[in-house]
Image (cartoon, rainbow, N blue to C red):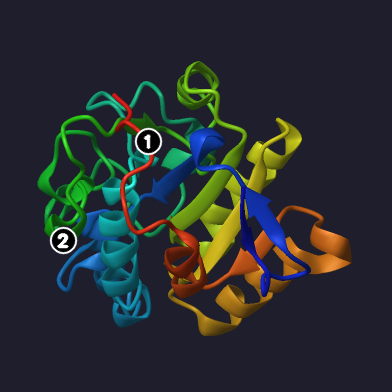
Amino acid sequence: MLTISDARPGPYAFDLSTTALLVIDMQRDFLEPGGFGESLGNDVGQLRRTIAPLAALLADARAVGLSILHTREGHLPDLSDCPPAKLSRGAPSKRIGDPGPKGRILVRGEYGHDIIDELTPLPDEPVIDKPGKGAFHATNLDVLLTERGIRSLLVTGVTTEVCVHTTVREANDRGYECLVLADCVGSYFPEFHRVGLDMIAAQGGIFGWVADSAQVRAALPSTPVLQPSS
């Protein structure tokens, strides 16, 4: 059992054999200059600061054989899995399915929908395509975690207050214990990021715990202890 003693609101203990690293929506359209996120006037630098610490964490997690799963938000090309309330949001010509800087916006198979090159999943790391904000809604994520005996999640990705927060809330309702890594999640809006993390750890950890990735990396063993998950 490993323990992150400086987590908020208190120490977080986890067993490598029942823990997975979840990487949420690190997609080109959200993070890359010239992508859909930037076309809306957002500062993608606020999200890109997560890349280096997350890449380092991924390397260490792979080295010890930790289960790793990635998600992508997006929809079928015919948009049949996109509810009208979501489809109608946004300014005309910048809605889901419209042509964007890196292909049709939030459509599976488009260049902008895929994960950034710096964090490319390995062949044995599942990529879960999700139509909603939360990673559990209308996906097989819960099945994959159950098959692996996972009960604890190290949560990373974007954005803190939307897809990360929604996923952590869903996970909490399903009985998973979540540690959100503050430097590996990001928002276009620094205040949303700060408050989102505070909300997770509030009231004794109402949704989970918060810590930095350096604390987790320091707690990991220096040699492999698990067989990589498939």
Q: Tags 1 and 2 in contact by the CB under 8 Å rule?
A: no
On the rendered structure, is 55 left or right of 169? left
Q: Confirm whether residue 186 shows in the render.
A: no
- C-alpha separation, residue under disc 1 versus residue under disc 2: 24 Å
Whether residue 117 is situated above or below residue 53 in the rendered picture: above
Q: Examine the image and state in which quarter residue 153 appears.
A: top right
Label 2 is placed on what type of residue? Glu
* Mark positioned earlier in the residue sequence (1 or 2): 2
Residue hosting label 1:
226
Labels 1, 2: front one? 1
Q: Position of residue 129 (x, y in %)?
A: 34, 32
On the rendered structure, is 27 left or right of 66? left
Whether residue 166 is situated above or below residue 12 in the rendered picture: above
Badge 1 marks a residue whose secondary structure is loop
Label 1 is placed on what type of residue? Leu
- Residue found 32% across the figure and 31% down from its top: 227
Q: Position of residue 11 (x, y in %)?
A: 73, 64
As drawn, the label of residue 77 is: none
Badge 2 marks a residue whose secondary structure is helix
Residue hosting label 2:
118
